[in-house]
Amino acid sequence: MVKIRLKRLGYKKNPTYRIVVIDGRCKREGAPIEELGHYNPKTKEMKLNLASAQDWVKKGAQPTATVTYLMKNCDEEGKLIYNKKETAKLSKKAQAKLEAQKAAEAEAAAAAADEAAAADEAQVEASEAGE
């Protein structure tokens, strides 16, 4: 039976995991059939090829409970979706990084909206000048 499970990496008391497709009879650190992504539980950082993972599930691969949870809480890009309860568990450094990332995304969205408004105004002025 083929399984989708976590393969532990990292050093003592600092685990990181790779999400792999592997034969169920192999040991945890055995050679995988395919690597689908990675997950760091300390920083809650994840990258997952969700389309490939769903394809393996359709073929009959059995995901573990943890991998099932990660697949359900994953967006289209393969990043983990945070809820407020999980954010509270993050370290101060990770929270600051997450807040900075959200602020940068909000700033980029505001800049794009301003550019779109300016383009619309220019188009209106051009059409008025053409009349």
Image (cartoon, rainbow, N blue to C red):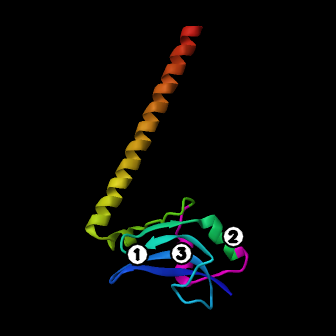
Which is nearer the eye, 125 or 81?
A: 81
Amino acid beneath label 3? Ile
Q: Earlier in the sequence, mark 3 or mark 1?
A: 3
Q: Is residue 59 magenta?
A: yes
Q: Left of 45 or right of it: where is 65?
A: right
Q: Secondary structure at mark 1?
A: loop
**Residue positioned 51% across, 80% down in the render:** 6
Q: With respect to residue 116, does 91 lie above or below?
A: below
Q: CA distance from mark 3 to mark 1?
A: 12 Å
Q: CA distance from mark 2 to mark 1?
A: 25 Å
Q: CA distance from mark 3 to mark 2?
A: 14 Å
Q: Name the residue tied to disc 1.
A: 41
Image disc number at residue 55:
2
> How crowded is the residue under tag 2: few (<14 C-alpha within 10 Å), some, or many (20+)?
few
Number of marks in the rendered image: 3
Image disc number at residue 8:
none
Amino acid beneath label 1? Pro
Q: Earlier in the sequence, mark 2 or mark 1?
A: 1
Which is nearer the eye, 106 or 42?
A: 42
**Residue positioned 40% across, 70% down in the render:** 44
Amino acid beneath label 2? Asp
Q: Left of 107 or right of it: where is 63?
A: right
Residue extending farthest right: 59
Q: Name the residue tied to disc 3.
A: 19
